[in-house]
Image: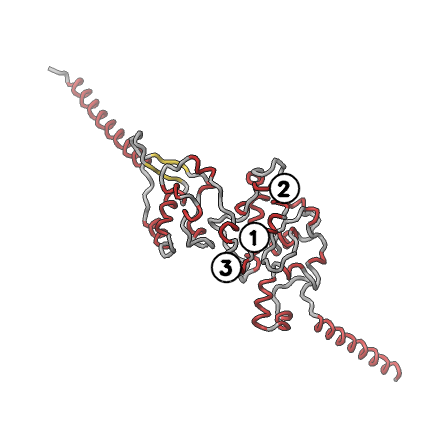
Amino acid sequence: MLKKSNVRFAGLYMILFVISVFLITMMKSSVTKAIEPVKNDSSCNNLIKKFAEHKNAGENEKCFKCHGQSNYSYENKNEIKPVRKRMYTELIVDRTLFYESNHREFKCIDCHSEDYLSFPHAVNLRTEAKPNCIDCHGGDAKYAKYHFENIEKEFQESVHSEKHSDDFTCWMCHNGHIYKITARTNDNIKQTVAYDNAICLGCHGDITRYQVLTDKVNPNLIKKHDWLPNQELHFKSVRCIECHTKKINDSVLVTHKILPKKEAVKLCTECHSNNSVLMASLYKYKIREVRSAKGFFNGVIVNDSYVIGANRNYFLNVTSLIIFGLVIIGIIIHAFLRISK
């Protein structure tokens, strides 16, 4: 017969064994859940429905399923479980920004090869050339008012194009997935300034992108502009291109001829004068709208695009000088009459 102590030990071992099996099962379950592919929850489905009204949104979702998030999953016949990978940051396209952009009604394969529809993508697709603006918009009557041919000509003469040749393309500044025009539609000038300056800072404020084209050390923009009084106000109120471009073509809303730094505007009077360059660039569209709605004369006087020294009106200046002169004459006559008594 078994001793009572042995029975007790056997019972204890059995309990420990059951507990161990239970813990191992739970651990396996949690590990399995951790490697399951990400499923679309209700919020993600709502996000997809939100953009469903856009043309080709359903077809584009095939691409956004991977390129619209930070990770993606796929089945591999050599693996027991689905494979989950991290999506490279530069290959992620934000759905929201895409459907706010100028190209929101396009299909992905309108610009990218149809070979991308098969997965895994062929390796040679990595070297596929990206279309430039002129490839689609050049010679098209629908976009003639934007004068893309003139923009292309100015760009070819810019310091970017001359220094970097074919390595510098439209995509360096204008990401076709998220680019939108703000200057023509946005009443808030400071938002336009912030948006356009962010394009320049995308390289000049990011050393990793800057050194894609050059081995030079990205200059400290604050130190380079230490000659500029009240830097913070200028950076918030004026676009980089106001001082770093040449206003040579009135048919182009935003000039694309970027000047070398030695030719950049440094004279205060270039902006703070009656002939301010800002009125021919940053405020050009707004001034045209105001003058069209209120007439030329009122458009000059009623102008909320205020720049110190640039918003003077000849007639108001003359009137104020006449009033000031009359006041002085009145004071002199009054003083003479008092003294003569």
- In the foreground, 168 or 148: 148
Q: Amino acid at mark 2?
A: Lys
What distance separates the C-alpha of mark 1 from that of mark 2? Answer: 22 Å
Residue 310 image offset from top left, x and y in percent: 68, 63
Give me the residue at 22% from left, 25% from top.
Answer: 17
Element marked by disc 3? helix
| Residue hosting label 1 | 196
| Residue hosting label 3 | 141
Q: Amino acid at mark 3?
A: Ala
Q: Is residue 44 left or right of residue 202?
A: left
- Nearer the observer: mark 3 or 1; the answer is 3
- Tell whether label 2 touches label 1 (CB within 8 Å): no
Quarter the N terminus occupies: top left
Quarter the C terminus occupies: bottom right
Give me the residue at 68% from left, 61% from top.
Answer: 276
Residue 125 image offset from top left, x and y in percent: 44, 38
